Image (tube, helix red, strand yellow):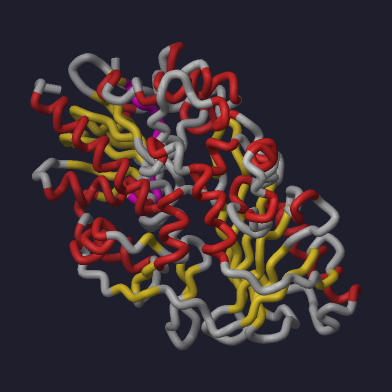
Amino acid sequence: MLGAGADTASETITRDVVIVGGGSTGTYAAIRLKDLGKSLVVVERSHRLGGHAETFYPADRTPINYGVEGLFNTSATRAYLRRLNVTYEVRVPASSTDQYLNLRTGARVQVEPFDEQQVLKPYLDAIAQFPFLNDGVYDLPDPVPEDLLLPFGDFVKKYHLEDTILPNINHGCGDILKTMTIYHVQYLGIPHAKALGEGYIRPVNGMAEIYTRAAKELATHLLFRTTIRSIRRTHNGVEVTVRHANGTAQLIRASQLLLTIPVTLENLRNIIDLDPHETDLFARWRHQTYHAALINNTGLVEGVNLLNIDPDNPLSVPYEPFIWRIDAQRVPGYCTIKLVGNQSFSASDARQLLVETFARLRAQGTFPTARKPHIVTWGDHTPTTMSVSAEEVRDGFYSELYGLQGRHRTFYTGLSWASDYSTLLWGYTDTVIEQMRAAWAQGM
């Protein structure tokens, strides 16, 4: 029996691999598999590839990256950009100055100048004992070091790092002092700090160029504005029924399934035949919410970045929900803004926080001309910083999670499996493709 809706499928297609999700990892995997000579199809619910790599082009066509803003400057990153004929440059922020504010009150905060790399050095020395995290993967020893299971605030106290913690960094974790240390390290570890020190690179024509070029190359392999109706996995193959924007259904038969979307029950339980073990693992996730927007008509002073810290809190770390920072852009009048909250922090809540913050900046007199900004475009990057409890990490959650690779002809990549930075995600995706190749060699 085929998956629900397959009886009305207008056409059945057969491929080696069906990829669910055309974000950073789905696109990268598609290019790699194409280069390996495999037939594939990418199912993407939106109208474009790239996921969080969002670029806005104003009238003068100067790109404004309001989602992902840069990439680690590694040989692997550069090779991928060259593969797609994407011209890149060192990421140089807009000419601007930083001001620290307590956005909870709207007041300015005085911060003495500091060297970021020097401040971070004791922290980096403390986490050097965890080299197995250097690739952004949860490749954990057994037993898991207890230090990694501490709330990060306790780790800071244990290693006397109070003077080395930058309150306006690693924002995606939310309340960083309450975040488990393993997740703090996975979002600000050795490779991340190296990138901060050496600088990022970015496509000259905007982050979106990676994905527009990939889309041209993959054109015959892409199903845009298409949703999954059902996925049925058998010993002999995978059957995926999809629905297109025009309402028609289609059946895809493939040898392997590559899921690149976050593996939450919310995303999966109504579309795929999860077994009890998969259901148990995917039910454990918690996550942060993350919103990115491009705004104008703000009334702010041009050329000023606003960084949010809260001196009333331990180590001046802002409590969630909070605005991470508001950054001036190369195009006058535009700012990017990033907003972070817990699992219940909705897009509506984020927009309200944005409006209230600008009202406080005006009422406080910090920026007397501040006004309700115009939202040019909005990006929802939820979920981010997917996590489980310390007990679950200790009891081998990640070993069980990675043990799912290849089971039921299904492989996985994306932010559920590695640090949510494109370069690290692509590196992990390479290892997954090697597992897929090994399975092909065994006839799967």
Give x and y (percent) for residue 111: 74, 70
Give x and y (percent) for residue 11: 22, 37
For residue 441, side relative to residue 277 (left or right): left
Q: Nearer the viewer, residue 343 or 77?
A: 77
Q: Nearer the viewer, residue 100 or 246?
A: 100
On screen, residue 114 above or below 384:
below
For residue 160, side relative to residue 109 (left or right): left
Q: Main secondary structure of the magenta part?
A: strand
The image quadrant of residue 431 is: top left
- At horizontal 26% and vertical 45% (from top left) the residue drawn is 29
For residue 128, side relative to residue 373 (left or right): left
- At horizontal 34% and vertical 63% (from top left) the residue drawn is 73
Magenta segment boundaries in residue numbering: 224-232
Membership of 85 in magenta stretch: no
The image quadrant of residue 157 is: top right
Quadrant assignment for the C terminus: top left
Give x and y (percent) for residue 418: 41, 40
Q: Residue furthest top?
A: 276
Quadrant assignment for the N terminus: top left
Give x and y (percent) for residue 80: 24, 59
Q: Nearer the viewer, residue 311 or 331?
A: 311
- At horizontal 36% and vertical 43% (from top left) the residue drawn is 135
On screen, residue 22 above or below 110:
above
